[in-house]
Image (cartoon, helix red, strand yellow):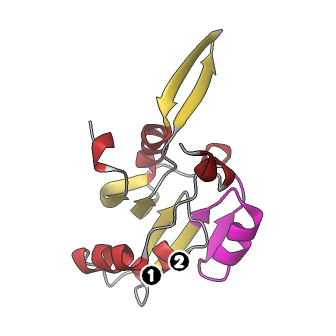
């Protein structure tokens, strides 16, 4: 990741036109459903995608200022990293995942390994989706493997 990206804690907000495009591809139930953004920033992307729908929104954000801003748009926000949360598996119908794009250093049993953050976030958060839930996964095309 570039130094500028590290300063922003890997934060690259989803552009408004992309939010609109995503929203247009989705259909929503008439019943209440849970939607989670584990890298919610200021909450604009998730709020925009589910606007006018019966969603209960959940966000997780590391940065204090962005977390405070997201509280004005999302129902529930935690200011921490996703790895510090306890979220029930199979609890949300929509998972919006726009993770940081960088290497993550893992230290397990005296061995140091690296894993791409976008892969780590996917691995950590997919269990939160209900069967048949929708994953919106925003990553650079060259990271699809």
Q: Position of residue 41 (x, y in %)?
A: 60, 66
Vertical comparison of 132 with 82: above or below: below
Q: Is residue 143 visible?
A: yes
Mark 2: secondary structure: helix
In the picture of the structure, the residue carrying the numbered disc 2 is 44
Q: Position of residue 99 (x, y in %)?
A: 49, 52
Q: Position of residue 49 (x, y in %)?
A: 40, 78
Count the labels in the image. Answer: 2
Give how far apart the Cα atoms at labels 2 and 1 are: 6 Å
Q: Spot the residue most to the bottom.
A: 52
Which is nearer the eye, 113 or 30? 113
Which is nearer the eye, 64 or 87? 64
In the picture, residue 69 is in which quadrant?
bottom right
Q: Residues within 10 Å of mark 1 (few under 14, many from 20)?
A: some
Indicate left or right for 46 with 74 as reference.
left
Identify the residue shown where x is 66% and y is 83%: 72
Identify the residue shown where x is 71% and y is 53%: 80
Q: Is residue 40 magenta?
A: no
In the picture of the structure, the residue carrying the numbered disc 1 is 48
Q: Which image quadrant: the C terminus?
A: top left
Identify the residue shown where x is 49% and y is 64%: 36
Magenta segment, which residues?
59-80
Indicate left or right for 77 with 36 as reference.
right
Mark 1: secondary structure: helix
Q: Residues within 10 Å of mark 2 (few under 14, many from 20)?
A: some
Indicate left or right for 58 with 115 as reference.
right
Circles 2 and 1 in contact, beta carbons < 8 Å: yes
In the picture, residue 135 is in which quadrant?
bottom left
């Amino acid at each position: 990741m570039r130094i500028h990206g590290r300063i922003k804690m890997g934060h690259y907000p989803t552009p408004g036109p992309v939010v609109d495009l995503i929203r247009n591809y989705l259909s929503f139930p008439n019943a209440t459903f849970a939607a989670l953004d584990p890298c919610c920033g200021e909450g604009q992307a998730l709020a925009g995608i589910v606007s006018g729908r019966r969603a209960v929104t959940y966000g997780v954000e590391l940065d204090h200022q962005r977390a405070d801003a997201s509280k004005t748009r999302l129902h529930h926000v935690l200011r921490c990293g996703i790895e510090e949360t306890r979220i029930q598996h199979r609890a949300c119908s929509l998972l919006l995942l726009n993770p940081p794009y960088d290497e993550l250093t893992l230290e397990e049993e005296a061995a140091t390994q690296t894993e791409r953050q976008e892969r780590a976030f996917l691995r950590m958060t997919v269990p939160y989706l209900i069967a048949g839930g929708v994953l919106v996964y925003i990553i650079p095309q060259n990271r699809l493997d």
